[in-house]
Image (cartoon, helix red, strand yellow):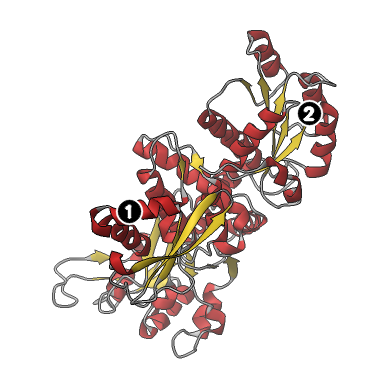
Amino acid sequence: MKLCNPSSIQSDAGSAMTKVLIVDDVEESRWVLSNIVRQSGFLPIMADSGARALVLTEQEEPDAILLDVGLPDMNGFDVLQQIQKKHNSLPVIMVTGNGNIEDAKHALRANAFDYVAKPFLNSDMIQLLTRALRQRISRPWNPSQDVPMKECSELLKSMGCSIYVQKIIREKTKVSATSFAVLVIGETGTGKELVSRAIHEESGRATKPFIAVDCGAIPEALIESELFGHEKGAFTGATGLKIGAFEAAAGGTIFLDEIANLPYSVQGKILRVLETRSIRRIGSIQEKPIDFRVVAATNIDLKNADTKSFRVDLYHRLAEFTIQIPPLRERREDLVYLVNRFLERTNLELSKRVVGLSQDSWDLVHAYQWPGNVRELRNEIRRAVLLCPDNEAIDCSLLSNLMVPLNPPTRKPEINASETIIHQAEHFETEPAMKLSDSQSGFEFSCQLSTQDIESLISMDGGLCLTKVIGQAMS
């Protein structure tokens, strides 16, 4: 794991990342804690005295504080008391080198979030800090606001705490109390069904069914039967009565996912159902009234879609209220929370103790564009946790799916160790890197191997070991 240099922290103080204020008069302790904070994906800000801590609390508005009890100018508990006068929801973790029971009792009586004695395990501190920040982000609203705390916290747990998610929650809460048809718009993997279910669960229909239909997964020949149902004998193979999705959603909500995939011929029939609030099963001559609410989702701009592929009148019927979910690359404030959430859940699922991400891994996560959005992020973290040893941080080598070369080769060249030459040595920080190239293909790459390492590999097994290293680098 690559540790960061705390001297670079001050230049980052204006960052929009989650901030953790570290208050300790011992430079070595600040250095250790700052690297733990960065390993967790947060931005450390440091103070060496109580007075400086109070100033930075106002200036930087941290999301959590690691506060040493023994400071040179003030008692840590006095600092805690002054912070809580203005910021009573700010989680403060008291840290001490004494570890006596009286300090622990004092911390609890003073409403500190928790109390930690040195020395401590890095993994324990990371978990404690994550819990403290989770408490912090579950309190972004006050009672004067019109969003109920219970519903807010559920979506916050699943989507994050950025201003974009808060806007979605406010819109979801307002429309849930109505009978409006809702169109949820967002790229694949952004959480459209999650928001749609939340609308249903907060509405007056919450005790009735929520029926989800993937409009792109049903063969065109069966789509009408799936939506409207059929009578026995209506067509070859109709051996019994079938209840369609609209009928199954009676009293509740029908969710039409990826509605843009509906065949054009079926769109007119959906429009009629929405207008008449009744369905007719295939093979029946009777209309059956149905009470339902419709929520639809799409990953394309239906408002400006080709009128030959999607009906304008159906769009306007569905879009009585629209909710736009931005892609993950546009709400990077949620990345840290989502990564830690998926990390914690996967640790529990697999009974593992992966402690976080290395700084290089966090850099990779923040730089990646996430075309698959939250679903892709979840899959990548789950895979990395599975491969990562316990009590270690996820190294960037375990996030290989994110490391896409800018100019990938059109084919994987055959590597002949005897024709592979050491091309150039460069130094990155303190670790030498070798740039190697294949004389036949012109393929070139860099690897973190010293000159001595590469010479040893060439001399072993006729260069076979080096061939394996190069082959792995290109795979």
Please name the residue shown 59% across and 68% down the image: 322
Return the x and y of residue 52 as percentages of the image width and height. 83, 33
| Frontmost residue, 201 versus 402 | 402
Question: Contact (CB < 8 A) between labels 2 and 1?
Answer: no
Instruction: Give the class, few, some or many, for how many residues have Cα within 10 Å of label 1's Cα (few <14, many ≥20).
Output: some
Q: Is residue 266 left or right of residue 297?
A: left
Q: Is residue 460 left or right of residue 445?
A: left
The total of numbered circles placed on residues is 2
Residue 267: which numbered mark, if any?
A: none
Return the x and y of residue 367 as percentages of the image width and height. 56, 60
When the figure is inspected, residue 389 is found, relative to residue 463, above or below; the finding is above
Instruction: Give the class, few, some or many, for how many residues have Cα within 10 Å of label 2's Cα (few <14, many ≥20).
Output: some
Query: What amino acid is at disc 2?
Result: Gln
Disc 1 designates what residue?
A: 457
Residue 84: which numbered mark, if any?
A: 2
Return the x and y of residue 152 as percentages of the image width and height. 60, 46
Residue 325 in view of the camera: no
Where residue 178 sits, quadrant-wise, is bottom right
Where residue 6 sits, quadrant-wise, is top right
Distance, label 2 to label 1, CA atoms, is 60 Å
Q: Quadrant of the C terminus?
A: bottom left
> In terms of secondary structure, where does tag 1 sit?
helix
> In terms of secondary structure, where does tag 2 sit?
helix
| Frontmost residue, 436 versus 279 | 436
When the figure is inspected, residue 351 is found, relative to residue 183, above or below; the finding is above
**Eye-nearest disc, 2 or 1:** 1
Q: Earlier in the sequence, mark 2 or mark 1?
A: 2
Query: What amino acid is at disc 1?
Result: Leu
Residue 196 in view of the camera: yes
Q: Is residue 141 left or right of residue 309?
A: right
Please name the residue shown 38% across and 55% down the image: 454
